[in-house]
Image (cartoon, rainbow, N blue to C red):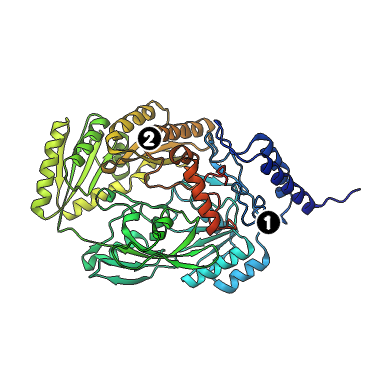
Amino acid sequence: MRCFSFSRLVASCKARLHQTLRSHPPRSDASGDRLPSFARAALIPLAVAASAGAALAFDPFRLTASSSLCDPGLDLRLGGKDSTDLVVKGIHSKVSNEFIQEMKDILQDNMTLDYEERCFHGKPLNSFHRAVNVPDVIVFPRSQDDVQKIVIACNKYKVPIVPYGGATSLEGQTLAPHGGVCIDMSLMKKFKSLNVDDLDIVVEPGIGWIELNEYLKPYGLFFPLDPGPGATIGGMCATRCSGSLAVRYGTMRENVINLQAVLANGEVVKTGSRARKSAAGYDLARLLIGSEGTLGIITEVTLRLQRLPQHSVVAMCNFQTIKEAADVAIATMHSGIQVSRVELLDEVQVKAINIANGKNLPEVPTLMFEFIGTEAYAQEQMLIVQKIVSEHNGSDFVYVEDAEAKEELWKIRKGALWACYAMAPNNYEAITTDVCVPLSRLAECISKSKQELDASPLLCMVIAHAGDGNFHTVIIFDPDQDEQCQEAERLNHFMIHTALSMEGTCTGEHGVGTGKMKYLEKELGTGALRTMKRIKSVLDPNYIMNPGKLIPPHICI
């Protein structure tokens, strides 16, 4: 009987794939496929070979370091235009004992192979996304030097890397579809340098934004971005997050002065100085902000700070329809007022807040405003907005200036996602998705989405950072019921395609991860995506940095 040669089969498949693609280069057609059917057929025996044994290297599709085709180890349909699969697949090769020993030499006790811990890190909190694999090892670096050594070892053994911050990301950014190493940054929490006179601070990535603001408060300073509770500075940079204050202060992109990161080859790069502005060279900080760990591991960040406002007023008002509420948000922005927050909640979200917090708020579409400045200026802004509200059929305009009352209102707003679960059985999950549209299209987009959500048998609610055209939908469903899963994903598709049809984006602040990849080609076009892929292939030729995220796998170069 003839002996089976695994390596011979892999070599044969690679040769066949290379010959096929050379004869028939990848092209785009109406279906969105990036490989012709015969090229896909050429991949089948290679995929079979990959699953037949762990001797295959992590990156079976890469023929040479300079010959990048499509993302390795992923079903080429995943992330495509018609994808509805919520489980991310990937090729998993067991890490070697030599690699594990090298990790132990670097980290001593700051690592774990415990299965429960690996499962915990492999499933993001409050996210409906899943992966077929979990990390092989969790490491906890204490310094940039530790991170550098970990990355060098991973690049040497071609082991995938997944950075891990506060685990609050919602689009599968911290999934480990290929296994590999999860780098948990929670031990890197130093405040390295506070420069009060310059209004900036240098921090390590494991610090949370809430923790940061507690540290800054005695100095009369604060960092103005406020995503979900638990988010850390490194993760906030990686996803280019924002929050309710972005309407006044901008997103993470505008609030990072410079950063340091470890690239895939272990090289440490610093993207700039502490100067408030610079025209020196490429803007590498902005390249890494929003890259979701696919280009490097962020190890230090210099943040722009703000003075705590002298005075603030929080106001609330009610409307009969969500369109009226959105129209007031638009009119407020057109008035020229520098409002610091404009938050919109639909009637279902308000009901959830009442149930979860024992409140008795009117269960109708509601707007929340925050005005800051001197006491006189904040009052003047509030009166202007009160007049706008009355002109758009708003009612019950109330405001608070007491510090505890204001804190309580924003605490309720920040806990909106958890409030949603109070209306559903314990085993239910949520698709929490977001889009952003030009401000003039906000009312139309929210109204159209809301009409579809209300007609669905699923429990759905809308909450928006209405001042910058960004709104979220929370869709509650039973993960054990296929019909409910399909309906939840249908609503997600509908909302995103509605936003894209209005020159909007598939994500205003949650990022791409695995969940939004399938929409990027429609939003950005293949030219932009191929450019991203080229950047990725140069900075990460072994494809170890958070593989399977952000760039759709069917994009080839």
Q: Amino acid at mark 1?
A: Ala
**Residue under the image location 32 percent in, 68 percent down:** 274
Q: Nearer the viewer, residue 453 or 117?
A: 453
* Percent position of residue 58, x then y: 65, 55
Q: Which image quarter: residue 482? A: top right
* Residue furthest left in the image: 376
Disc 2 designates what residue?
499
**Cα distance between the residues tagged 2 and 1:** 41 Å
Q: Amino acid at mark 2?
A: Ala
- First in residue order: circle 2 vs circle 1: 1
Give the structural element (helix, strand or loop) at label 2: helix
Q: Nearer the viewer, residue 67 or 481?
A: 67
**Residue under the image location 52 percent in, 30 percent down:** 483
Disc 1 designates what residue?
57
Q: Is residue 264 above or below residue 486?
A: below
* Percent position of residue 184, x then y: 49, 62
* Percent position of residue 145, x then y: 49, 72
Give the structural element (helix, strand or loop) at label 1: loop
Q: Is residue 287 visible?
A: yes
